[in-house]
Amino acid sequence: MKTIKVAEDFGGIGACTQAFKRTGLPFEIVDYVEINQNAVNSYNAINDTHYEPQDISKWDKDIEIDFLMHGSPLY
Ligand SMILES: C[S@@+](CC[C@H](N)C(=O)[O-])C[C@H]1O[C@@H](n2cnc3c(N)ncnc32)[C@H](O)[C@@H]1O
């Protein structure tokens, strides 16, 4: 089966990534966007990644994804 390319926006500590892991489907996170340094640190510790904080309002990458997960704030 094809590896699903997933992006997680407003990723926080990565609940969406954890949920996707539980599907058992083959996937890779191709980008994770979160502005808060502490949340990014937690995400990196949990997932053994090295992301830096990113502001979604400035995000402008040209990447290919199959699936977008996000939990945007209410404000
Ligand atoms: C409702 S929480 C999402 C929680 C996430 N699903 C988790 O598992 O922790 C919204 C998140 O959006 C982040 N956020 C707010 N403004 C942002 C921005 N401009 N760019 C990126 N992330 C932002 C907040 O820091 C917060 O972690």
Image (tube, rainbow, N blue to C red):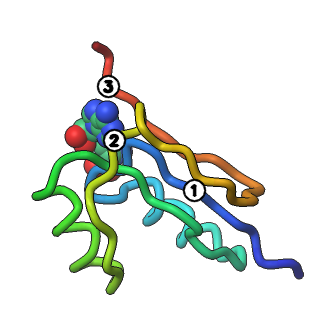
Residue 50's place in the image compared with 67, above or below, is: below
Of marks 2 and 3, the one in the foreground: 2
Residue 4's place in the image compared with 45, above or below, is: above
Label 3 residue SS:
loop
Q: Tell me which amino acid carries mark 1.
A: Ala
- Residue farthest along the left direction in this orientation: 38
Which residue is labeled 1 in the image?
7
Pointer 2 local density, CA inside 10 Å: few below 14, some 14–19, many at least 20:
few
Pointer 1 local density, CA inside 10 Å: few below 14, some 14–19, many at least 20:
many
Q: Is residue 1 left or right of residue 55?
A: right
- The residue drawn where x is 28% and y is 65% is 52
Q: Answer with mark 3 or mark 1, whichever residue precedes in sequence.
A: 1
Does the closest atom of ligand 1 sit within 8 Å of the Cβ of label 3?
yes
- The residue drawn where x is 27% and y is 75% is 44
Cα–Cα span, label 2 and label 1: 14 Å
The circle on residue 55 is: 2
x and y percentages locating residue 12 in the rendered image: 28, 50
x and y percentages locating residue 24 in the rendered image: 65, 76
Cα–Cα span, label 2 and label 3: 13 Å
Would you say the residues marked 2 and 3 are in contact, meaning their CB atoms lie under 8 Å apart? Answer: no
- Residue farthest along the top direction in this orientation: 75
Viewer-proximal residue, 43 or 23?
A: 43
Of marks 2 and 1, the one in the foreground: 2
The circle on residue 43 is: none
Label 1 residue SS:
strand
Q: Quadrant of the C terminus?
A: top left
Which residue is labeled 3 in the image?
73
